Image: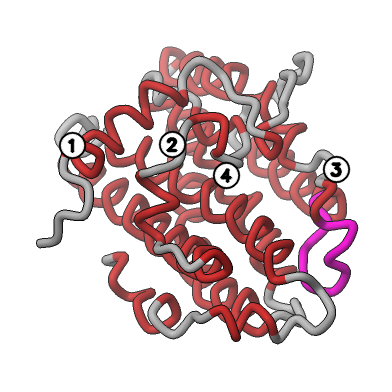
Amino acid sequence: MSHTSNRTISDAVTAETIATSGSIAPEAVARYAIGLGDDALILAQRLGEWIAHAPELEEDVALGNIALDQLGHARSFLSYASSAWEKTEDDLAYFRDESEFRNRQLFEQPNGDFAQTIARQLVASLYFQALYNALCQSTDQTLAAIAAKAIKEVDYHVDHSVQWLMRLGLGTEFSRERMQHGLNSVWAFVAELFSNDPLTANLEGIAVDPQTLQEEFDRLVKKAIAEAGLTVPTVPAARGGGRAGIHTEFLGPLLAEMQVLARAHPGATW
């Protein structure tokens, strides 16, 4: 599905739309939306790296489509956020520096091998599924509308990652070993997804407290991993801090590649 399918939401967003959150400052809602948009944007960029490199042609298409879905979600959130400062979604995507990005660290991790990408995608998809289901109840009508559309696509993303988890976990000894290694490699970044986000404290009814999502996530991810004959990793949590602009060494090179054309030709249009 192309990211252009989100255009009706993105193009309708204005500063007045954000202001409908009542006494909440528009900038507070915008900052929250930026975090959501950055998560989706950075994951989309990572998944796009698989195009023409996936283990089979069908996966080139599948991962490319998931990347486009994520890019569509990012466009909607960033377009909504940008209107608070009279900017555009492109300004936020291409003309912020590394420390200004607010994505959780999981999404910037390298693809690794295919099993590692599936492990990251399993975690990401189940997290987004829980998040968007909760965000559908937001009193902010635009955030709720973005989530309601996104959840339909994320449900497919969950199915895709679970099917590959099963296929690799229950396949050969080598595929099971690689799938377990993939889970082990991304698991340190799971805890941050559910860590306290100071922004949500002042956005009651609008934002989703990530800590409320962990119980459902844990139930579903443990069930999927067990059915695949694998083990839930036990590893120390990474430092985290993505929502505060603290990132791993992998985000800078990703942004350099993503932003190079826009920065080389600022203001250019197609």
Residue depth check, mark 2 versus mark 3: number of the one nearer the observer:
3
Residue beneath disc 1: 264
- Residue behind mark 3: 196
Q: Between label 4 and label 2, give the one nearer the viewer.
A: 4
Give the residue type at disc 2: Arg
Rendered image: mark on residue 33: none
Residue at far left of view: 270
Q: Is residue 159 above or below residue 204?
A: above
Residue 228 in picture, x, y percent from top left: 58, 35
Q: Earlier in the sequence, mark 3 or mark 4?
A: 4
Label 3 sits on what residue type? Answer: Asn
Residue 124 - label: 4
Disc 2 crowd, CA 10 A, few/some/many (<14, 14-19, 20+):
some
- The residue located at (53%, 34%) in the rendering is 120
Q: Earlier in the sequence, mark 1 or mark 2?
A: 2
Q: Helix or strand or loop: what does disc 2 sit on? A: helix
Residue found 80% across the figure and 53% down from its top: 199
Q: Which mark is residue 167?
A: 2
The mark nearer the N terminus, 3 or 1, is 3
CA–CA distance between discs 4 and 2? 19 Å
> Badges 4 and 2: C-beta atoms under 8 Å apart?
no
Counting residues from the start of the chain, the first of labels 1 and 4 encountered is 4
Q: Is residue 244 left or right of residue 98?
A: right
Question: Looking at the figure, which quarter contains the N terminus?
Answer: bottom left
Label 1 Cα neighbours within 10 Å, binned few <14 / some 14-19 / many ≥20: few
Query: Which picture quadrant has residue 172?
Result: top left
Q: Which residues are magenta?
A: 200-210
Q: Secondary structure at mark 1?
A: helix
The amino acid beneath tag 1 is: Ala
Callout 1–callout 4 Cβ contact below 8 Å: no
